Amino acid sequence: MFSRFDYYAPQTLNDAFAALSKNGNARILAGGTDLVVNIRSGKIKPSLIVDLKKIKWLSGVTKTDRGIEIGPLTTMNELAESSLLKGPYSLLSYAAKIMGCYEIRNRATVGGNIINASPGAETLTPLTVLHASVEVSGNNNKKLIPLNKFVTGPNNTVLSGGEIVTKIILPFYPQLTAGYYMRRARVKGMDLASVNCSVLVVNPNNIEKCQVRAAFGTVMPTPYRSQKAEEILSGKKITLDLIKQAASVINSEINPRATSLRATPEYKRFMVEYFLKTGLSKILGVTF
Amino acid sequence: MKIKFKLNGELKTAEIVSYMTLLEVLRDTFGLTGTKCGCGNGECGACTVIMNGHPVRSCLILGVEADGSEIFTIESVSANGLSDLQKAFLEEGAVQCGFCTPGFIMAGEALFKRTQNPTDEEIKIALGGHLCRCTGYDAIFKAFKKVKVKKTL
Ligand SMILES: Cc1cc2nc3c(=O)[nH]c(=O)nc-3n(C[C@H](O)[C@H](O)[C@H](O)COP(=O)(O)OP(=O)(O)OC[C@H]3O[C@@H](n4cnc5c(N)ncnc54)[C@H](O)[C@@H]3O)c2cc1C
Ligand code: FES
Ligand code: FES
């Protein structure tokens, strides 16, 4: 069925690094829902698969003094059910809950999702507005990279062959901070998002301190945030007029590609204002 | 590579190559052909089995990943006669060509293990990724609604 490869499931991270450094054509396996599809199609031809699933501490959600720490091997269903991903973080668990289908969500991991980095990847826009950082571990070094620097393009990240993502870290937020995730797909059933968006409002109860963040998926090669549009919406009472201004700024900055299989650039541009309006009205409990 | 795992309640070992899917191992190595290959790409649900208590798509899992796990296939469901869900499928006419049926049944057996009395919404979530080209889904949905208490797998 496949091109041939060897398989190794290390018990420790050091064993994983040793295997990766010995074999230049090795690939890491998490849930396999992208990797196995890509091997079958011949897109990649690894000679060794290094399965990380026996390294138990790479999965699970915990709260530490750094913030909410998510193991890269945490599955979508585990994210959806996590008691720590409530309040400010609930848009992430919601996105996890509606991606793919139930069986896919039992395997698909959040690490695999951000590393595969498809432009409409479900967890990318929620993690972007939450200012996630990615802990990347190499053989004898470890660095923290902001998610917006980690993802460099469709199916591309800064990760080099021997490196492993070991954590995804979300900062703490003031209590009432809230977010909303939205997606549109071609069919009601299982389909990748044609276009998606996450809105987060930090301090929604305090007009001066209120900060609006919005990230859009599939309108640019990586999740897109407009600094100018967010400034228009932050620190003041939000009105329909401000939303329209912000949407028009975003539309002047983005460049959705015409060759997308799932939605036309016109549709994606149309959705910008709709997503902003819907997200903000859900979060703030007002209609615009 | 040698794998050792529990298959439908019995401890099994096999010598397999590392580039086979779990679906191929179940069908070709163990001869359990009830689990179907509809697409081989995770899209249709025909290959659904229950691994360590969770329904998963066996076409996207390597056979070697089964090592140390516990797996139930459609063959286990009717080991002692038809399950409540299988009976409901027959009563509602939820089977036509039958190719998708093992996948729907395995998703259902797992659902009724999670919750004995699922809401319509929970049924739809459990079946959301399963394709059926014959029945139009309505009969399948009705069969699910008929089953309230699941017999243990
Ligand atoms: C039927 C189907 C439906 C899908 N629907 C959706 C959808 O609705 N939305 C969506 O966003 N995606 C969807 N996907 C895509 C896929 O399920 C997700 O992208 C998933 O999150 C990938 O995670 P995984 O654990 O399966 O990754 P894998 O396939 O195991 O790995 C993906 C990539 O990441 C690398 N990798 C994984 N973990 C690490 C790590 N810790 N360190 C370094 N490298 C690592 C692998 O080497 C590989 O290159 C779907 C896929 C299928 C088959
Ligand atoms: S054969 Fe596995 S999902 Fe279709
Ligand atoms: S009965 Fe034929 S595909 Fe479902």
Image (cartoon, grey):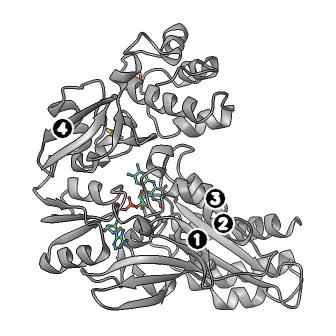
Task: Kindly report which numbered mark, 4 or 3, lies closer to the viewer in this rendering.
Answer: 4
| Residue A252 horizontal side relative to residue A117, left or right | right
- The crowding category of the residue bearing disc 1, from other C-alpha atoms within 10 Å (few below 14, some 14 to 19, many at least 20), is some
Give residue B4's position: percent from left, percent from top.
Answer: 22, 42
Residue visible at 36% across and 85% down?
Answer: A158
Mark 1 touches mark 2? (CB < 8 Å): yes
**From the viewer's perspective, is A11 left or right of A144?**
left
Alpha-carbon distance for marks 3 and 1? Answer: 18 Å
Position of B152 relative to B15 (above/below): above
Instruction: In this rendered view, identify the residue nearer to me: A144 or A259.
Output: A144
The chain to which mark 4 is attached is: B
Q: Which residue is mark 2?
A: A84
Q: Check disc 4 and give the amino acid type.
A: Thr
Q: Residues within 10 Å of mark 3 (few under 14, many from 20)?
A: many
- Circle 3 is placed at which residue position? A94
Q: Which residue is mark 1?
A: A62
Q: Are marks 4 and 1 on the same chain?
A: no
Task: Return the residue nearer the eye: B144 or A186.
Answer: B144
- The amino acid beneath tag 1 is Thr
Helix or strand or loop: what does disc 3 sit on?
A: helix
Check disc 4 and report the residue beneath it: B13
Q: Chain of mark 2?
A: A
| SS class, disc 2 | loop
Label located before the other in sequence (3 or 2)? 2
